Image (spheres, helix red, strand yellow):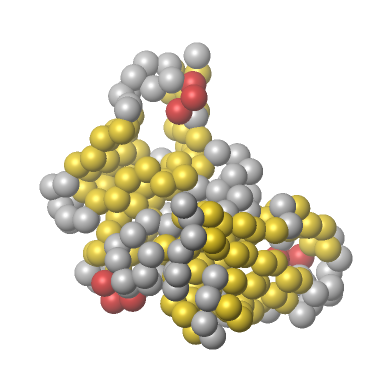
Amino acid sequence: SQTIHQWPATLVQPVGSPLSLECTVEGTSNPNLYWYRQAAGRGLQLLFYSVGIGQISSEVPQNLSASRPQDRQFILSSKKLLLSDSGFYLCAWSVPDTSGSLHFGNGTRLTVT
Amino acid sequence: EDQVTQSPEALRLQEGESSSLNCSYTVSGLRGLFWYRQDPGKGPEFLFTLYSAGEEKEKERLKATLTKKESFLHITAPKPEDSATYLCAVQAGSSASKIIFGSGTRLSIRP
């Protein structure tokens, strides 16, 4: 069966520090991968999605970036965090070329102080 | 531009009091509409996928329906454990890999 791992679960970082969040998927090949951010009490904002290694689509211009160095690994990064980067970050995967649903990780709660 | 709007933002019901949540959408060529349930501090959990107008799906006390412009999530005789945020999302034909979400409805069921 497929599983998705996302870490860390919580993170507190000062303004201006770098960020690296990692997500890995097991039990499936060539998945579509996604990063979403959720502000408190709000819906999910699509940040990046990827249909293959090295292929990244960015939805929101900001100081975040994403990379997909391996088929089942998706990394969200920032060189310098802003206060507005605080939120709940969710990684998800789906079966490619279908109208398939997303399968989410447990999320990372990021607080920028 | 593809857009998803959910209403109401929050809904408080008494146990057993049935109601409906709304999701209206504007997309170019709908490939799929999804409903998710999210508990506090956790990732969303998949409930339903609807593909075409007129389609309906049921799971326990929940029933999802789809028209050409909106979807409804009907909750029949809810229980306190149905309290959660319910999220609607769409996948558009214009960019098949892109899935966008509405802002959600926070549902609270009082015993």
Q: Report the side of A112 relative to A104 (left or right).
A: right
Residue A45 visible, this angle: no
Q: Residue at x 54, y 61 (%)?
A: A26
Please tell me in which quadrant of the rendered image residue A73 appears.
Answer: bottom right
Q: Report the side of B18 relative to A15 (left or right).
A: left
How many numbered circles does the render carry? Answer: 0
Q: Residue at x 50, y 35 (%)?
A: B84
Residue B83 at what x, y percent from top left?
49, 29
Q: Residue at x 32, y 45 (%)?
A: B48
For this orientation, the residue located farthest to the bottom is A54
Q: Report the side of A67 relative to A100 (left or right).
A: right
Residue A104 visible, this angle: yes
Q: Is residue B9 above or below residue A46?
A: above
For the residue pair B47 and A82, the one nearer the viewer reads as: B47
Q: Residue at x 19, y 42 (%)?
A: B56
For the residue pair A16 and B51, the one nearer the viewer reads as: B51
Residue B92 at what x, y percent from top left?
30, 68
For the residue pair A23 and A39, the one nearer the viewer reads as: A23
Residue A85 at what x, y percent from top left?
70, 66
Residue A92 at what x, y percent from top left?
51, 60
Q: Report the side of B97 relative to B41 (left or right).
A: left
The quarter in which the N terminus of chain B is drawn is bottom left
